[in-house]
């Protein structure tokens, strides 16, 4: 189940990151930098929050 | 920079996204972006449906579902079509299923993304954005 959670999180983050990169950047370099930053922050932020809830919820 | 549209025409063109995600950008001449937006927003919407998310009716008594329905209505025609086809019917879904929550997130996000596309297309159409 945790794999399903992670894959869903990853898929959601990829879609949102690509959407905002397409919306805000016209040059290829800016596009990939923006997508990478958004994706990284979304995945790491979500995992940090999930583990925080997991550890404090016991 | 593209030639800007008169304001009344810009409203009309930007609302085309409510029929098909990205259609406004296609009409403005941003063909590549239109294709990308169509794939991303439709993909998010379909993933939400496949994950058993709910397409909430505005008449829902739960205020959170009602708020979700406002966001989902941002999809326009796909929301109406999905409701007509019986997708995401709350009486057929297991709302305790963890995937229900994920599906809702995808559906609400798709609606909000589409609203942003309408605003983006309007800005391009009136010449505020390249």
Image (spheres, rainbow, N blue to C red):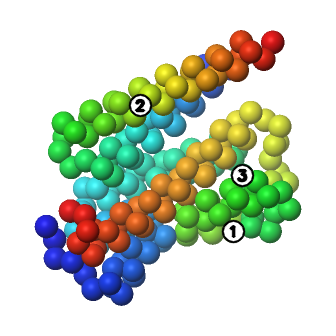
Under circle 2, the secondary element is helix
Who's the residue at 63% across and 49% down the image?
Answer: B49
Q: Are marks 1 and 2 on the same chain?
A: no
Quadrant for residue B14, please give it: bottom left
Taking B18 as reference, is A27 left or right?
A: left
Query: Gap between marks 1 and 3, in whole Å?
Result: 13 Å
Q: From mark 2 to mark 3, how far is it between C-alphas? A: 26 Å
Name of the residue lying farthest toward the left = B1
Q: In which quarter of the image is the C terminus of chain B?
A: bottom left
Q: Mark 1 points at which residue?
A: B84
Q: How crowded is mark 1: few (under 14 residues within 10 Å), some or many (20 or more)?
A: few
Where residue A53 sits, quadrant-wise, is: top right
Chain under label 3? Answer: B
What residue sits 61% from the left and 23% below the top?
A49
**How far across and how far down the image is residue B8, in percent?**
36, 87
Residue A15 falls in image quadrant: top left
Marked residue chain, label 1: B
Nearest-to-viewer mark from 2 and 3? 2
Residue A39 circle label: 2
Question: In this figure, which residue is indicated by the disc labeled 3?
Answer: B54
To which chain does the residue with label 2 belong?
A
How far across and down, in percent of the image, does residue A16 sit? 45, 42
């Amino acid at each position: 189940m945790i794999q399903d959670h992670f894959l869903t999180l990853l898929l959601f983050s990829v879609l949102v990151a690509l959407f905002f990169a397409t919306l805000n950047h016209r040059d290829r370099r800016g596009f990939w930098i923006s997508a990478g930053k958004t994706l990284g922050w979304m995945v790491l932020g979500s995992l940090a929050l999930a583990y925080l809830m997991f550890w404090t919820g016991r | 920079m593209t030639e800007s549209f008169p304001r009344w025409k810009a409203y009309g063109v930007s609302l085309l996204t409510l029929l098909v995600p990205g259609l406004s950008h296609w009409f403005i001449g941003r063909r590549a972006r239109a294709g990308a937006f169509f794939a991303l927003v439709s993909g998010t919407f379909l993933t939400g449906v496949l994950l058993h998310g709910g397409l909430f009716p505005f008449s829902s008594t739960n205020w959170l579902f009602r708020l979700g329905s406002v966001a989902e209505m941002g999809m326009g025609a796909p929301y109406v079509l999905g409701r007509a086809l019986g997708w995401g019917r709350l009486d057929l879904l297991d709302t305790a299923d963890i995937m229900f929550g994920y599906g809702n997130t995808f559906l609400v996000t798709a609606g909000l993304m589409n609203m942003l596309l309408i605003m983006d297309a309007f800005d391009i159409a009136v010449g505020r954005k390249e």
